[in-house]
Image: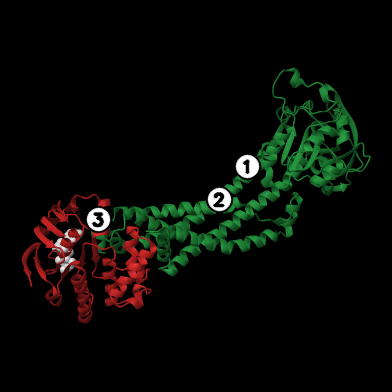
């Protein structure tokens, strides 16, 4: 039997019961609409939130000294000179690279003191990247020539009882054992999106932080950003390739001095490329948990639809027992008959999936172009967390593939029973009806 | 060509307390080109006998040989191919595939035989002309009368050029006039083309048209006459 004849036969068999086929395809399509809507919204939000959230702290990627993440030591730094920056900027797919110098210290004002995280940032580049200036609630952002200005997290400011214009003393350990101590003036109070950090963060202009810690032209991290979240793996690979073979001290920086790593003879001298998930595992966990709960809902939905699909496919076969008997009797091999039933399942699945895409795509495209705006308190809360007050949608192919995979499994599972029945069918008995 | 039944026996429910011997040690020879009616009361075993002759059912004991081939010894796979190439089937309820047109129904078994599309179409159209349905080729069974459907079924049975045609009560669902029309058709095919027909029936009008009548009762041949 020619394949065209077989497929045509299967297709026509599927449409023998138009209503039943429509109902089944319709339920598959509805399940696709609901789950694609949810998953598209989820993934769109993750990508959006991730893009926003990573700007404040982890970036998509960070370049660090190989030992910085374990020790957090102010001795484990990377260069920040032009030669190094040029190298960083040659990473394929990179859109932004901002330097940061992060360390610990003790912040004191009046009779109060507290352990703080000091973050030295390049004022203009940082604002362009993370929108830090927009987070200033009182006072002002760094200005040109600000040598001793500091921005303080809102909760920290409250604890230390300081306001813009007040003085803040920072103590700590500087580069290679130097003592770090400096007097700063609070320029502004910021509202940091992460509460834990809001009660600990102090921003300084990069030059001021480098002076405080006596690090010279060095930073603790180069924070890298790319076009979009989907491109992170590629960006990571490109970053590794570009930084390959470059240690923290042989990056072509003439000002670099001895590296404790190299003198210790270890081979672990490569610059480390860390992605956002390594730097902020809690963020990744949060997304994974949310995604899994969404996928679980999708599975429940498809589980329900699966019963309908099973009933249809089972009926399509069981009600045609005699017809199958006739086909077997007249010389249709059993395997051909099983193949026919399989083709019928495929036709039914294809109809459902096609219908699903036809009703879902316009909806998703519309919401992709016009993300749902949030309003009222939710909008305010979202904005306060540093996110745009919208629910964006994703059109990532993976979401669609996920649905199709689930449906293929469902239809395959539902087809096994009819196929088994045909395998066992006796022509003489089937002819009796 | 000859169909030789030797000691053919079918016992249903053999392993239970109430075994049913539907066909009891029947030995028969049916020659090529014959036009045979198997008659007998309901439950006498006609269908069971025909199914075993056609290789649709396997006997409990005994053998069916068609042109010296003992089909009871064939593996399932070979038996399917043997049926496809050597035996045409006509059923009481016509049993056409409802989604296929008359022409496609006739082509079906030829498709299974692997003939080219054009060869299938050519032969199907030729056969449908012979059974008088040249203007119904693209019609689906639901839009054909019972008599027309059974004509398509005759064409379908003949399409693969079988050695013989088995028809289990082919006229049971037809009225008197249509029954005669169908018998005329089968007789014409038998006489012009030498195709062997074996059919079961209760109908005395049908029996009257047969050349050989085998009377079946309770699984036994009680009478075997030529007329
Ligand atoms: N699958 C089966 N299991 C058990 N008994 C069966 C089975 N098929 C047929 N029989 C029995 O075998 C006997 C012969 O049945 P068969 O169908 O061959 O008769 P028939 O002559 O074709 O009858 P009818 O004229 O009503 O079609 C009957 O007693 C029937 O009940
Ligand atoms: Mg019968």
Measure the alpha-carbon separation of dots 3 and 1: 64 Å
Per the rendering, the mark at residue A103 is none
Q: Which mark is residue A285?
A: 1
Residue B63 x/y as whole percent: 14, 53
Give the chain letter for red.
B
Q: Which residue is mark 2?
A: A295
Q: Is label 3 in a helix, a strand or a loop?
A: helix
Picture coordinates of residue A283, whole percent (x, y): 67, 42
Given residues A40 and B187, the one toward you in this image is B187
Residue A365 image offset from top left, x and y in percent? 65, 61
Q: Is residue A38 shown left or right of residue B209?
A: right
Q: Quadrant of residue A246?
A: top right
Which chain identifier belongs to the green chain?
Answer: A
Which residue is tagged 3?
B82
The quadrant of the rendering that contains the N terminus of chain B is bottom left
Among numbered discs 2 and 1, the one appearing first in the sequence = 1
Chain containing the residue with disc 2: A
Q: Position of residue B181 (x, y in %)?
A: 22, 78
């Amino acid at each position: 039997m020619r394949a065209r004849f077989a497929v045509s036969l299967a297709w026509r068999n599927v449409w023998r019961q138009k209503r039943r086929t429509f109902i089944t395809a319709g339920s598959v399509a509805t399940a696709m609409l609901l789950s694609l809507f949810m998953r598209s919204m989820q993934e769109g939000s993750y990508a959006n939130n991730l893009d926003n959230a990573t700007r404040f702290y982890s970036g998509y990627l960070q370049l660090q000294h190989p030992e910085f993440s374990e020790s957090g030591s102010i001795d484990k730094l990377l260069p920040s000179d032009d030669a190094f920056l040029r190298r960083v900027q040659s990473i394929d797919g990179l859109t932004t690279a901002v330097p940061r110098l992060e360390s610990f210290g003790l912040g004191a004002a009046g009779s109060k003191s507290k352990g703080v995280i000091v973050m030295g940032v390049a004022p203009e580049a940082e604002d362009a990247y993370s929108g830090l200036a927009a987070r200033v609630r009182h006072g002002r952002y760094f200005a040109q020539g600000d040598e001793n200005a500091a921005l303080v997290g809102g909760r920290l400011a409250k604890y230390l009882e300081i306001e813009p214009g007040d003085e803040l003393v920072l103590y700590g350990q500087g580069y290679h054992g130097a003592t770090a101590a400096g007097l700063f003036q609070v320029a502004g109070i910021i509202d940091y999106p992460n509460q834990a950090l809001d009660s600990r963060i102090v921003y300084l202009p990069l030059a001021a932080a480098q002076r405080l810690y006596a690090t010279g032209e060095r930073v603790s991290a180069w924070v890298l950003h790319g076009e979009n979240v989907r491109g992170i793996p590629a960006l990571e690979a490109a970053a590794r390739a570009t930084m390959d073979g470059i240690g923290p001290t042989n990056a072509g920086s003439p000002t670099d001095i001895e590296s404790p790593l190299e003198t210790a003879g270890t081979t672990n001298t490569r610059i480390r490329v860390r992605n956002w998930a390594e730097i902020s595992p809690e963020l990744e966990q949060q997304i994974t948990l949310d995604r899994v709960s969404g996928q679980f809902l999708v599975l429940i939905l498809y589980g329900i639809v699966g019963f309908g699909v099973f009933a249809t496919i089972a009926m399509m076969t069981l009600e045609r027992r005699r017809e199958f008997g006739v086909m077997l009797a007249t010389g249709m091999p059993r395997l051909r008959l099983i193949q026919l039933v399989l083709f019928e399942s495929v036709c039914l699945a294809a109809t459902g999936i096609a219908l699903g895409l036809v009703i879902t795509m316009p909806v998703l495209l519309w919401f992709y172009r016009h993300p749902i705006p949030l309003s009222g308190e939710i909008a305010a809360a979202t904005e306060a967390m540093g996110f745009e007050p919208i629910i964006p949608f994703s059109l990532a192919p993976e979401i669609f593939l996920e649905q199709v995979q689930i449906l293929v499994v469902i239809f395959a599972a539902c087809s096994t029973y009819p196929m088994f029945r045909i395998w066992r069918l006796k022509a003489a008995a089937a002819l009796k009806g | 060509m000859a169909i030789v039944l030797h000691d053919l026996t079918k016992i249903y429910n053999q392993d239970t307390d109430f075994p049913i011997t539907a066909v009891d040690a029947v030995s028969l020879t049916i020659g090529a080109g014959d036009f045979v009616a198997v008659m007998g009361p309901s439950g006498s075993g006609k269908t069971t006998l025909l199914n075993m002759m056609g290789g649709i059912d396997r006997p409990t004991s005994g053998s069916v040989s068609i042109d010296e081939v003992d089909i009871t010894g064939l593996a399932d796979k070979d038996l399917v191919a043997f049926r496809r190439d050597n035996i045409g089937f006509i059923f009481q309820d016509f049993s056409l595939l409802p989604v296929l047109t008359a022409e496609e129904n006739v082509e079906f078994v030829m498709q299974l035989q692997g003939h080219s599309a054009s060869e299938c179409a050519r032969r199907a159209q030729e056969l449908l002309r012979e059974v008088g349905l040249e203007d119904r080729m693209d019609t689906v069974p639901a839009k054909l009368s019972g008599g027309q459907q059974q004509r398509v079924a005759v064409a379908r049975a003949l399409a693969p050029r079988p050695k013989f045609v088995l028809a289990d009560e082919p006229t049971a669902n037809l009225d008197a006039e249509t029954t005669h029309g169908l018998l005329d058709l089968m007789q014409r095919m038998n006489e012009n083309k030498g195709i062997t027909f074996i059919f079961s029936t209760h109908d005395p009008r049908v029996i009257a048209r047969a050349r050989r009548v085998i009377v079946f009762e309770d699984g036994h041949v009680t009478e075997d006459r030529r007329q």
